[in-house]
Amino acid sequence: MAYAVAAYLHFVAIFLLFSLLVLEHQLFRLPLNFKRARSLFRVDLAFGIAAGLVLLTGAARAMRYGKGLDYYLNNSFFHAKVGLFVAVALLSIYPTVTFLKWRPALKAGQVPSISPSAARWVKTVIRIELLALLLIPLLATFMARGLGVIPQ
């Protein structure tokens, strides 16, 4: 039963992570208004928390509630999956820093400013993150089918 609950929590965290990034993508458009800017700030914070939950539940599955750590560490698709997750985490720094810079304006009740060029970069990075997140379940499917096992 614990294995099923761990898998369920991991899947829910993944769905939450993806949903929050889609929401961020939908909210981010120019011209900004105060309500959307504040929502983006909050959604990005929730995205970071969801990423932490994905990491924690994934680690729990790999170490305790899955096929065993050796299975995962000896699977190239697992390494690719973790690599993509790390890439998404690194990419997410740019939008997060952008939104964190808005904090003073938001606290003052003002609409934060962002150049059209910076806005395009944020939107592009979010789209790349979404694409990478869409590839992770494909890699997980291959891994779960026993593909990518590194011979010892």
Image: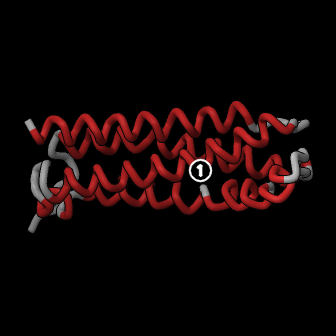
As drawn, the residue found furthest toward the front would be: 108
Given residues 139 and 89, the one toward you in this image is 89
Number of callouts = 1
Q: Which residue is mark 1?
A: 45
Q: Is residue 25 above or below residue 132?
A: above
Residue placed most toward the observer, 127 or 43? 43
Q: What residue is rendered at 21% in x and 57% in y?
A: 75
Q: Is residue 41 left or right of residue 32?
A: left
Q: Quadrant of residue 16?
A: top left
* Identity, as a three-letter code, of the amino acid under mark 1: Leu
Q: Is residue 85 above or below residue 123?
A: below
Q: Is residue 2 left or right of residue 44?
A: left
Locate residue 86, reporting x and y percent: 46, 61
Circle 1 packing at 10 Å, graded few (<14), some (14-19), many (20+), is: some
Q: Quadrant of the C terminus?
A: bottom left
Disc 1 on helix, strand or loop?
Answer: helix
